[in-house]
């Protein structure tokens, strides 16, 4: 019988227990650092302790409970087993909702109106048509493509940046590092949906953010490590950038005394852009366990070389 070990931060494992037992009757579930966890065949991970996966001699499959796998691959000792992630229509729909909300927050001036309301200021801003707002999406994968398509449906002018050339109806796609600066130069609302890899860490730094037109805004939904937060704050204070919605941070939860909570123009959200349900996570893990057992190709396996 198959055995699964949870290598996660506290609180993550509990809600997965019942759905996994329903999906895989008879499965043995353990949790790191229990001694039995070392003997498990499958590791279910979110931020596994460094070195732990390398210490599991029977390990055959490493499964992220999230779309991102940076929390696993950041450990150079991770053994060379398949690593799979979560891709799900409802997870995608949740991210698209967040991106649409964030785009409208700036496009319809809610950032300004909410600030004005706190000071009882009645002020209307000139309404713009959606095509007048250029939304640029960094990353055109499972999440970025859906958000881009829905923004096109609403009439926004949409561009995107990916590593390899791509084509998506209504979206102007830029690809490769050389295309990043020209892409940024034409963006009013920049949405980050990149995976965190050695090529994308710190990508939103002073030099890149300064390429955005004056008055542009940022929606950071990817990972905190993509952003050099001090550079963002400097550009906000200089008036080059208008505002930012930050959903992800280098340190989470963001400490209550962190200055970003109080930085004018910054709205902090608690890594909630989208979240897969325990039922969906369990179904996808179980499906991959069954595939592994019968030697079938796994779903949503990441490319260890690319890092996503
Ligand atoms: P995918 O792997 O499906 O897509 C990644 C996209 O990024 C691809 O288009 C890829 O290009 C592009 N990309 C990767 N590296 C580069 C690079 N160096 N230069 C240019 N483009 C690059 O990922 P998902 O869409 O599923 O998820 C994206 C990220 O969203 C996750 O990794 C995670 O960090 C974050 N996330 C955040 C959540 C939240 O609640 N805040 C929830 C879920 C995910 P190409 O197409 O050419 O391969
Ligand atoms: C994810 C996340 O990667 O929640 O799924 O950030």
Image (spheres, grey):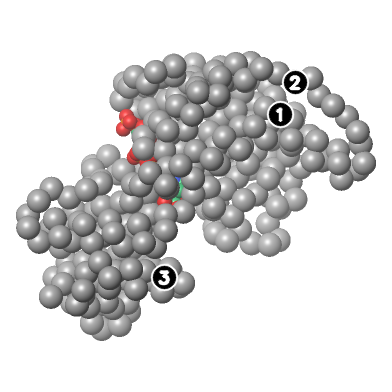
Q: Secondary structure at mark 3?
A: helix
Q: Quadrant of ligand 1?
A: top left
Image: 44 above or below 259:
below
Inter-mark Cα distance, 1 to 2: 7 Å
Inter-mark Cα distance, 2 to 3: 45 Å
Residue hosting label 3: 15
Q: Is 257 positioned to the left or the right of 58 in the image?
A: right
Residue hosting label 2: 127
Residue in the image at 74% along x and 46% along y: 263
Q: Residue 206 location, x and y as percent?
A: 59, 32
Of residues 159 and 51, the one nearer the viewer is: 159
Q: Residue furthest front?
A: 22
Q: Answer whether residue 93 is visible to the viewer in this image.
A: yes
Q: Are marks 1 and 2 in contact (CB under 8 Å)?
A: yes
Mark 1 and mark 3 lie on one chain; the one further toward the N terminus is: 3
Inter-mark Cα distance, 1 to 3: 38 Å
Q: Is 118 positioned to the left or the right of 165 in the image?
A: right
Residue in the image at 41% along x and 74% along y: 14
């Amino acid at each position: 019988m198959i055995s699964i070990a949870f290598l996660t931060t506290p609180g993550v494992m509990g809600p997965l227990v019942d759905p996994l037992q329903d999906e895989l009757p008879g499965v043995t579930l353990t949790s790191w650092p229990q001694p039995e966890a070392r003997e498990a065949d499958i590791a279910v991970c979110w931020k596994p302790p460094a070195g732990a996966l390398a210490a599991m001699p029977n390990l055959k499959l490493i499964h992220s409970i999230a779309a991102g796998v940076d929390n696993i691959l950041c450990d150079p000792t991770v053994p060379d087993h398949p690593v799979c992630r979560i891709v799900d229509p409802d997870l995608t729909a949740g991210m698209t909702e967040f991106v649409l909300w964030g785009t409208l927050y700036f496009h319809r001036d809610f950032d300004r109106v909410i600030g004005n309301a706190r000071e009882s200021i009645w002020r209307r801003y000139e309404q713009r048509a959606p095509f007048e707002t250029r939304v640029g999406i960094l990353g055109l994968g499972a999440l970025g493509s859906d958000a881009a398509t829905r923004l096109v449906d609403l009439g926004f002018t949409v561009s995107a940046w990916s590593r390899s050339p791509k084509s998506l109806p209504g979206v102007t796609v830029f690809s490769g590092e050389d295309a990043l600066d020209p892409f940024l130069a034409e963006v009013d609302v920049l949405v980050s949906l990149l995976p965190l890899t050695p090529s994308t860490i710190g990508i939103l730094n002073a030099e890149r953010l300064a390429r955005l037109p004056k008055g542009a805004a940022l929606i950071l939904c990817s990972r905190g490590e993509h952003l050099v937060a001090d550079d963002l704050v400097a550009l906000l204070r200089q008036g080059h950038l208008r505002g930012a919605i930050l959903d992800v941070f280098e340190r989470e939860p963001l400490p209550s005394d962190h200055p970003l909570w109080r930085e004018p123009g910054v709205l902090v959200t608690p890594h909630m852009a989208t979240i897969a349900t325990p039922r969906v996570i369990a179904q996808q893990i179980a499906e991959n366990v069954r595939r592994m057992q019968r030697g079938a190709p796994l779903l949503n396996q990441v490319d260890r070389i690319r890092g996503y």
